[in-house]
Every structure is written in structure tokens, then in C-alpha cells.
Amino acid sequence: MSKNFALIGAAGYIAPKHLQAIRDTGNTLLAAVDPHDNVGHMDRYFPEARFFTEIERFDRFVEKCRRGPEEGRIDYMSICTPNYLHDAHVRLALRAKAHAICEKPLVISPWNLDALEELEAEHGRRVFNVLQLRLIPTLLELKQKIAAESPRERADVLLTYVTRRGRWYDVSWKSQIEKSGGVAMNIGIHFFDLLMWLFGDVEKSKVHLRTSRRMAGQVELQKARVRWFLSTDATDLPEQTQAAGKTAFRSLTYNGQELEFSEGFTDLHTHVYREILAGRGAGISDARAAIELVHNINHSEVESHVFGAHPLVTQTSTTATPFTRHTGHKAA
């Protein structure tokens, strides 16, 4: 049976993937909202959907649906807004008696998860988080392999994620730690979730590098010692990646065997939606561990030495720009 959806953050980069997922799973978008009206891509998916540029008018429409006939009520609300607004918009969805499907990170501060769990119980609705890396076939195979093994020592894991971001990044909300959670939260949260999903709980964590564009460290999990490196600086892309005209590089090395998964990211949101609609989606409890880890990383002192660090740390630390609470620059 078709479900009714609403979407918050329709003009954002990730919104088209949610619109496609709603359409491809055979459901209907009733309304969307965004303070920016650059939402022409909605015509490709749901040209008849209502659109609002004011959250108050959207809220009024949602409330009208809630009080109207059952067939017109909103069943799910997709949230594609900036990180610091996720918590508030999930609350809006629950008050509207709709399940929430929220982009990562679900929240920036881990203690906000407790309140959301209380609201889930109060309103009888679920909060789902988009953790699409768990659905990549090669990583599912790796998880099965790890589960079948009984190693005496922790595995050696090297995680590298470099995704190019232009100069706009330095003046956007994404560069402000209080709004994005910093590099580790903004681009790293789903990788930390992946690591714990694969290798178990955190036992120890170190930070070797923290700047406005790069972060690196080491985390010891139950079954692996992971050296990780995250960057939005194009100069950190491997030469072969740049030569191929690509703008992102994702690599996971497990005991010397590289599992490169830069490709195949096109329709994972649709798979996520299918899992949610089938009752198997990732919820608050699934998202908690990674959010707690990143919060601790952001509040940890940077190690004065880099012994055992990711190989890229020594190449970048001498030229890095120090990290500050607010890294935006004044317009020229």
C-alpha cells in the first residue's frame, strides 16, 4: 500500500536521492519545504507536491493532514536539512504522528538521542537514520567474513576518505563545528558507524590531526585497530583519482587487502527506504555509538606525536591550517 511522505530540505544536495527513493518505492510526496526555492528537480519526481518556503506554513499543512482523513495523513517525513537542525525536524515529524527518516548525523550531541527515544515512545512513531554503507555488497561480505573468523589479534584497518570541497565550503554552515559537527561528523559519521558495525565497540581512541579541512586518528575496536583519515582538500586525492577526473576517494584496507568502494553509491538510498518500509531500518540505537565516538573525537586533545598514525598524517600535518570553532571567512 502506498505511503504518504513529506520532505524537509528540498533544495539540498541530498534531497534528490530521497525524492527518487520515495518514487522508486511506489510512494507519494504530499509536501516539501525549504527556505530556498531552487527546487526544480521536484518536477522530475513529484510535480504535484505542495511546496513551502516557510517552515511555519509547512507545519500548518502537516497539522491539517494529521487532523484530516486517514488516507491523506503523512506516514513518513524525510529530513535532509543541515546537521544542527535534524533534532528539531525529527521532533516536528513525531509531533505530526509521522515516522522520521533522517540523514546522518541524526544529532550532533549524543544526549539529544535520549529525548528522541522518549518522544518515539510518546508518539508511537519511529526515528530512522540513513546508514547506507551497511548495504554495500562488498562490505556485507566483509562483515560475514569477520563474523566467521576468530582471530587472536586485532585486524589492521586503514580507512581513507577524501572528498573534494571548493572554497564555498569555508563559508558555509558545514565549516562551522557548532552547526555541522566538524569534519569527523559531517563527512565521517557513516564511516565510523561502518567501522563499529564491522569490528565492534570502541575500546580506545586517539586524534592525530584536527584542522578545518582534515582530521585523522586511531581507534581500537574489539576486532580491529583502525587508522583513519578524512579530508575535504582536493590535494589529498590520489594522483590516479585526480587523473581520472574523479572528486572522491574511499578506501578500506583490511589486513593489507584493499577494499575500494568509491563506486556504486547511486541507488543506496532507495535500498535504505526499502529496508525502512519493510520494518528493518536503522534506528536511534543503531546511530548512537558513532555519534558518541565522534563527539569524543571532537573533544579529545590532539596527540603530540603521530606514532602509529595514518600514513597521510605526516604528509599533511606540517601544512595544515589549525582548526577553530568557526572557520568561515569573510567575503572578499
Image: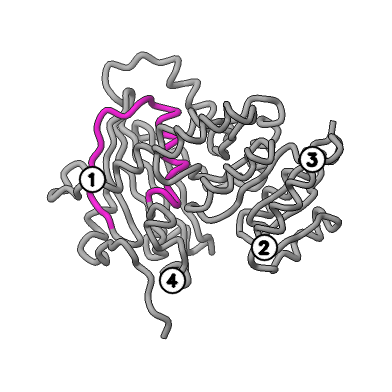
Residues 123 and 167: in front is: 123
> Crowding at label 4, few (<14), some or many (≥20) Cα neighbours within 10 Å?
some
> Crowding at label 3, few (<14), some or many (≥20) Cα neighbours within 10 Å?
few
> Crowding at label 1, few (<14), some or many (≥20) Cα neighbours within 10 Å?
some
User: Which mark is drawn over residue 300?
Assistant: 1
Residues 305 and 29: in front is: 29
Quadrant (top left/top right/bottom left/bottom right) for the N terminus = top right
**CA–CA distance in space, label 1 to label 2:** 38 Å
Front tag of 1 and 3? 3
The amino acid type, in three-letter code, at marker 1 is: Ser
The first of marks 4 and 3 along the sequence is 3
The first of marks 1 and 3 along the sequence is 3
Residue at the spot of label 4: 171
Q: Position of residue 255 (x, y in %)?
A: 34, 31
Is 71 on the left-hand or right-hand side of 207? right
Q: Which residues are magenta?
A: 184-210
Quarter of image, res 53: bottom right
Is residue 191 part of the magenta span, yes or no?
A: yes
Residue at the spot of label 3: 67
The first of marks 4 and 1 along the sequence is 4
Quadrant (top left/top right/bottom left/bottom right) for the C terminus = bottom left
Residue 114 higher or lower than 78, as above or below:
above
Secondary structure, mark 2, is loop
Secondary structure, mark 3, is helix
**CA–CA distance in space, label 4 to label 1:** 25 Å
